[in-house]
Image (tube, rainbow, N blue to C red):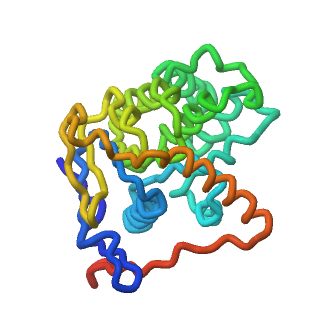
């Protein structure tokens, strides 16, 4: 069974076309990696999907993007900042996040134990959130959505700029797939797109989504322009400074959708 996430999306600014009549379909329980070096464009595309589909949740891992922080008011958009409950331990935090489950506390604790085991966090059940590493916090943030009634979880991982996060993402993919979720993992690094559990890869290129074969072929190795990572870090630093001055420039585009979507 396939889920049509979005269809016939065109994104353009003036005469420049960033997405040209793009559609995206995800099979049930499938994990797809989405590559591409235009991070703002990918984020916009993911937000279009989340805004159109009620059964999708988008996890945003880059707290420096102000436009994403605004979206944290919606339960479809989850920010890393949602984990900042320093006085909670991991179990207490998941009790809070799973409070929507209408069941006795004893049953809820059984589910929490199951989730911690599935995602390899069982030894951290009593750890305070403030003592977790950034990688552990990423994984717990994903675990916190693992009782969502939504069918598809999108992980905006374009702020992951080193391969050390790969084991964390692989555990997240394995855990989510074992629960029947479909997954889209948006990343810049080929190494992360090649994570265990990924079934399909796509790359946004020339306004289209190009299907890549697994594993990544040599012809696709140069998906990332030389110096992109250092440039991206510099961009984040500049973004933080501009955010403090409340003078961030907005990415303005025109989104064209079929009339049936309205």
Residue found at x 25% / y 67%: 22
Q: Looking at this rendering, what residue extends furthest in the top direction?
A: 123
Residue found at x 62% / y 59%: 65
Residue situated in front as seen by the camera: 141 or 10: 10
**Quadrant where the C terminus lies?**
bottom left
Q: Is residue 242 above or below residue 100?
A: below
Residue 262 appears anywhere in the view? no
Residue situated in front as seen by the camera: 146 or 206: 206
Q: Is residue 243 above or below residue 197?
A: below
Residue 234 x, y percent position in the rendering: 63, 52
How many numbered marks are there? 0
Q: Is residue 157 left or right of residue 234?
A: left
Q: Looking at this rendering, what residue extends furthest in the right direction?
A: 87
Residue 211 appears anywhere in the view? yes
Q: Quadrant of residue 67?
A: bottom right
Q: Quadrant of residue 178?
A: top left
Residue found at x 29% / y 72%: 9
Residue 62 x, y percent position in the rendering: 60, 50
Residue 211 x, y percent position in the rendering: 20, 49
Q: Is residue 26 left or right of residue 85?
A: left
Q: Is residue 184 above or below residue 191?
A: below
Q: Is residue 108 above or below residue 65?
A: above
Q: Is residue 37 left or right of residue 10?
A: right
Residue found at x 36% / y 75%: 11
Residue 122 x, y percent position in the rendering: 58, 17
């Amino acid at each position: 069974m396939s889920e049509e996430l979005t269809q016939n999306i065109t994104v353009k600014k003036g005469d420049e076309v960033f997405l040209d009549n793009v559609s995206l379909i995800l099979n049930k329980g499938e994990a797809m990696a989405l590559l591409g070096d235009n991070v703002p464009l990918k984020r916009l595309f993911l937000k279009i999907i989340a805004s159109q589909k009620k059964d999708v949740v988008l996890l945003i891992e880059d707290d420096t993007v102000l436009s994403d922080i605004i979206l944290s008011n919606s339960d479809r958009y989850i920010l890393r900042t949602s984990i900042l409950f320093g006085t909670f331990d991991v179990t207490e935090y998941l009790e809070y996040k799973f409070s929507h489950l209408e069941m006795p506390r004893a049953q809820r604790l059984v589910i929490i134990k199951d989730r911690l085991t599935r995602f390899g966090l069982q030894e951290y059940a009593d750890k305070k959130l403030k003592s977790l590493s950034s990688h552990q916090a990423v994984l717990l943030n994903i675990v916190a959505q693992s009782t969502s009634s939504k069918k598809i979880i999108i992980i905006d991982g374009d702020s992951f700029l080193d391969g050390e996060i790969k084991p964390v993402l692989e555990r997240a993919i394995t855990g989510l797939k074992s629960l029947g979720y479909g997954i889209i993992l948006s990343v810049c690094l080929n190494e992360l797109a090649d994570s265990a559990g990924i079934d399909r890869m796509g790359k946004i290129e020339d306004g289209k989504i190009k299907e890549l074969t697994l594993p990544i072929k040599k012809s696709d190795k140069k998906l990332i322009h030389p110096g992109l990572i250092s440039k991206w870090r510099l961009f984040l630093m500049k973004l933080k400074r501009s955010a403090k001055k409340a003078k961030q420039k907005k990415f303005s585009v025109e989104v064209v959708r079929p009339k049936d979507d309205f």
